[in-house]
């Protein structure tokens, strides 16, 4: 066996087995990335890297490869470029891999992407030439073999490629077997959908353990009652536990003072996620945590205690 | 198997043929008749509507299968005289019928334009009259032996080769407000039932488009 090649800080930490925290940045429908860069700088001391989303929900935003490059350059924070197979065919994606490398991108997360019909350009052609597993395979061929479709690449791209998983999926066995395909394709890490249900999470993580791919668990600390309620209502397939919603509601009522309210929310997140993560860590089911709460960078110091404390 | 058609909005047809006076209606007795867009009934209804709009009907024929060139050659021979006094043909059949008529007429009547009065939806499975479902898109490289007889190209909204995707919730698909089954969950359930989850676990290659993206034909040589 040749030694595992390392191309990024994320790759290095994953290889070392060190427990890690990653964050998420969501560029919007704009050419101005200053807010996102500001957020990246705020989370930079706490995370190894941050994901940069690719037109989530099929709602068009600034191109994720361009955004990833600019955020990395301006904030110094390493990013995980999210790429969906929704908008570009195999040929285009292969070209983008070389482009991404040339722009200094060293991590890519392979995603299917929400269907165009769901977004704000529903008349757009849904591509899906590749899927999330065959995209992983394509990247690994380019990186490891230095070829594409068998044709040599003069200076091949060097990126780590990850994939997504959904522990909330029902039927869960179909999802577990699908992760097996992604592992076979060569996924180097998994980032999961947001979870709140510890039983389901354990069942799923135990189910995919045999594939030996490091898992970063998706969590969503909730900045306010409104955010918690919105997440519960609008994210299909993930529900925020009733007790949490009730607790968040009572915080809103109990603390009219904004500053105290913020502290109470932060503390409540800490108290919910601390035992959750500790249990999974104890069971050795995780390689780290992926925090998907965008626009909530002030949670990171507390989250650091949750994850590493 | 039936090529499923629906009626084109009448106003849309009128706009397309607005400069035409004398019309021959060719209405298919096969699939379109079953879909109630063609056949004798469909032709009669269309003729009445067109006449009410001031168009003149040269003649009406209801061939056995408009998509079959041989049938059309025979049937057009019988109405050659009428064709000489017609300005256009309105076809009540699938798109194949329009192509067939155009090709058959290209020698003797190349200047007669051929219009279509239907929208061709898909090739469909019939549950009963009025309930037709797309189950195969004729991709030319059938995967059904590996997917428990359920087509991922057709039943998965993204035609994925390695589903289900993250858009699946409780077995339903994100496209269409979670009302339709996720094709990949159907495949999973069927293969599980058959004791063939080994097939489900298989990593599939992406579709090979090298043979698909151009005019396809089957020609015995
Ligand atoms: S794979 Fe699907 S679309 Fe292709 S021939 Fe088979 S059933 Fe038809
Ligand atoms: S939910 Fe299922 S059917 Fe819908 S796009 Fe995803 S895999 Fe395909």
Image: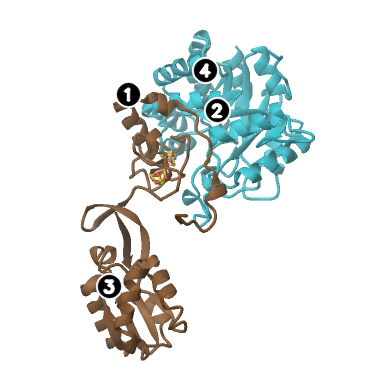
Whole-percent x, y for residue B134 in the image: 34, 51
Whichever of callouts 4 and 2 sits on the residue coming sooner in the sequence is 4
Q: Are marks 3 and 4 in contact (CB under 8 Å)?
A: no
Tag 4 secondary structure:
helix
Q: Which residue is mark 2?
A: A260
Determine whether the beta carbon of the residue marked 2 sits less than 8 angstroms from the nearest atom of ligand 2.
Answer: no
Asked whether residue A298 appears in the rendered view, the answer is no
Q: Which residue is mark 3?
A: B63
Q: Pointer 1: residues within 10 angstroms few (<14), some, or many (20+)?
A: few
Mark 1 against mark 2, which lies toward the viewer?
1
Q: Are marks 1 and 2 on the same chain?
A: no
Residue at point 37%, 29% (across, down): A170
Q: Which chain is brown?
A: B
- Chain holding disc 1: B
Tag 1 secondary structure:
loop
Q: Which residue is mark 4?
A: A211
Quick check: A85 left or right of B70? right
Mark 1 against mark 4, which lies toward the viewer?
1
> Disc 1 and disc 3: Cα gap in Å?
48 Å
Q: Which residue is mark 1?
A: B195
Q: Quadrant of ligand 1?
A: top left
Q: Pointer 3: residues within 10 angstroms few (<14), some, or many (20+)?
A: many
Whichever of callouts 1 and 3 sits on the residue coming sooner in the sequence is 3
């Amino acid at each position: 066996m040749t030694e595992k090649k390392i191309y990024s800080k994320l790759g290095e930490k994953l290889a070392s087995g060190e427990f890690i925290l990653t964050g998420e940045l969501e560029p919007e429908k704009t050419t101005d990335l200053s807010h996102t860069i500001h957020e990246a700088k705020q989370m930079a001391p706490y995370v190894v890297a941050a994901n940069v989303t690719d037109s989530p929900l099929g709602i068009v935003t600034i191109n994720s490869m361009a955004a990833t490059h600019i955020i990395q350059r301006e904030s110094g924070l390493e990013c995980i470029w999210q790429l969906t197979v929704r908008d570009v065919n195999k040929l285009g994606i292969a070209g983008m891999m070389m482009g991404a490398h040339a722009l200094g991108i060293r991590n890519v997360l392979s995603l299917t992407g929400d269907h165009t019909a769901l977004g704000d350009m529903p008349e757009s052609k849904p591509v899906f030439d590749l899927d999330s597993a065959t995209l992983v395979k394509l990247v690994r061929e380019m990186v490891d073999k230095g070829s594409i479709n068998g044709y040599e690449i003069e200076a091949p791209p060097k990126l780590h490629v990850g994939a997504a998983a959904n522990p909330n999926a029902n039927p869960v066995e179909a999802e577990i077997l699908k992760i097996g395909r992604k592992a076979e394709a060569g996924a180097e890490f998994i980032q999961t959908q947001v979870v709140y249900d510890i039983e389901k999470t354990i069942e799923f993580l135990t189910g995919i353990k045999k594939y030996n791919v490091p898992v970063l668990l998706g969590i969503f600390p909730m900045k306010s009652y409104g955010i918690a309620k919105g997440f519960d209502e609008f994210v299909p397939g993930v529900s925020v536990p009733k007790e949490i919603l009730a607790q968040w509601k009572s915080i809103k009522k109990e603390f009219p003072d904004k500053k105290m309210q913020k502290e109470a929310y932060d503390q409540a997140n800490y108290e919910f996620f601390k035992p959750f993560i500790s249990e999974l860590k104890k069971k050795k089911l995780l390689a780290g945590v992926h925090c998907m709460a965008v626009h909530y960078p002030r949670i990171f110091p507390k989250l650091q205690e949750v994850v590493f404390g | 198997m039936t090529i499923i058609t629906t009626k084109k909005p009448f106003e849309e047809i009128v706009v397309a043929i607005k400069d035409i006076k004398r019309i021959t209606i060719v209405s298919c007795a096969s699939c379109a008749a079953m879909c109630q867009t063609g056949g004798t009934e469909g032709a009669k209804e269309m003729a009445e509507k067109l006449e009410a709009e001031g168009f003149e009907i040269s003649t009406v024929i209801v061939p056995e299968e408009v998509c079959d060139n041989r049938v059309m050659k025979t049937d057009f021979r019988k109405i050659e005289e009428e064709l000489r006094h017609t300005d256009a043909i309105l076809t009540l059949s699938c798109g194949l019928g329009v192509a067939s008529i155009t090709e058959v007429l290209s020698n003797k009547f190349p200047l007669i334009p051929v219009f279509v009065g239907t929208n061709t939806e898909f090739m469909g499975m019939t549950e009963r009259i009025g309930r037709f479902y797309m189950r195969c898109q004729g991709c030319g490289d059938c995967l059904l032996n590996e997917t428990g007889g359920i087509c991922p190209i057709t039943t998965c909204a993204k035609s994925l080769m390695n589903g289900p995707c993250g858009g699946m919730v409780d077995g339903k698909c994100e496209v269409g407000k979670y009302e339709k089954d996720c094709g990949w969950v159907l495949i999973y359930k069927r293969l599980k039932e058959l004791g063939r989850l080994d097939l489900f676990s298989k990593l599939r290659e992406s579709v090979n488009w090298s043979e698909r993206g151009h005019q396809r034909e089957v020609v015995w040589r």
